[in-house]
Amino acid sequence: MSVPGPATAPDPGRAQANLPAVAVALLLLTATTGLALTLADGAFAAADRDPADRRAATALADRMVAADGPLTRRANVLDADAVSPLPAARLDSRFPVVEGHALRVRLGDRTLLERGRPSGGATVRRVVLVAEEQSVTVTPRLTGNVTTLPRRTDRVRLKIDPPAAATVRTVRANDRVVLHDPDGLTGTYDVDVSRFETVRLTFGTTGPLPPGSVELTYYPTRTTKATLAVTVDA
């Protein structure tokens, strides 16, 4: 039968040696907890801000591309002349939802407007077309007193200067009479036409029209695809 030996007394030196390690562990735990709470507070604060920023950015982006907006020709088609430049005061007067906010509006790789210094907030993007109107003037050679515009347009300016042997009484755009004067058409006229179809102009005259009798100016639109990015940071 074995007889248990005498109990070993705790080593005071070892216990004292472990005290610094325990203190360091407590210090690290306290620091980690504090950092976690700080990060959590920041995350909650950001979460509180982001919905409001996103609502404002979404509202502004939607209004900027609306069909009846001041910057568009139709829904999601921006007028190039209307958006460049884009003064902040003009934006505030037309879109008061973002007044006083830090704001950035970019179209493709261009910054149209920047107010303040948005460092966070929310960004909303919309794919749009940017329409840029051009002006083209031609003196067409009329075949049977008829000419067809090579590109679609929403209006035409006609300068009619017939020879003495011919009188232009009627101008038709496709099958619609757009100008008529029984005494004769001479001078400059602006005519609205459909931008959804190719325009064929027919001149009703008392004789043939030689080259130079008619000068046409039409306004085709060139469209390019781009991304509109609106950033709002309250």
Image: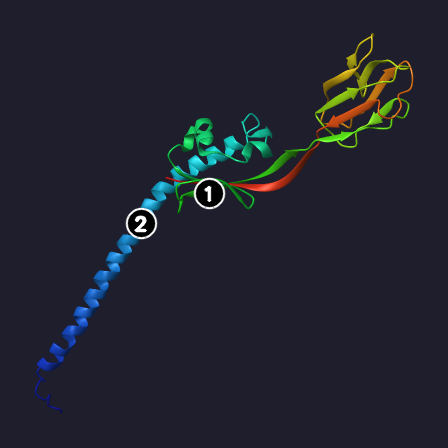
Please tell me which of labels 1 and 2 falls first in the chain.
2
| Label 1 packing within 10 angstroms: few (<14), some (14-19), many (20+) | many
* Residue type, numbered disc 2: Gly
Q: What residue lies at 81% left-to-right and 17% top-to-bottom?
A: 171
Q: Secondary structure at mark 2?
A: helix
Q: Is residue 11 visible?
A: no
Which one is nearer the viewer's eye here, 66 or 51? Answer: 66
Q: Are marks 1 and 2 in contact (CB under 8 Å)?
A: no
Task: Tell me if residue 92 comes above or below residue 110 in the rendering.
Answer: above
* Residue type, numbered disc 1: Thr
Q: Which mark is residue 166?
A: none
Q: Position of residue 136 (x, y in %)?
A: 73, 31
Q: What residue lies at 74% left-to-right and 18% top-to-bottom?
A: 188
Q: Position of residue 18 (x, y in %)?
A: 16, 76
Q: Is residue 50 visible?
A: yes
Task: Tell me if residue 40 comes above or below residue 114 in the rendering.
Answer: below
Q: What residue lies at 87% left-to-right and 28% top-to-bottom?
A: 141
Q: Quadrant of the C terminus?
A: top left
Q: What residue lies at 41% left-to-right and 33% top-to-bottom?
A: 98
Q: Is residue 76 left or right of residue 18?
A: right
Q: Is residue 100 left or right of residue 196?
A: left
Q: Which mark is residue 42?
A: 2
Q: Is residue 43 left or right of residue 95?
A: left
Which one is nearer the viewer's eye here, 198 or 205? Answer: 205
Q: Which residue is mark 1?
A: 123
Q: Position of residue 114 (x, y in %)?
A: 45, 40
Query: How far, Cα to Cα, is label 1 from label 2?
Result: 19 Å
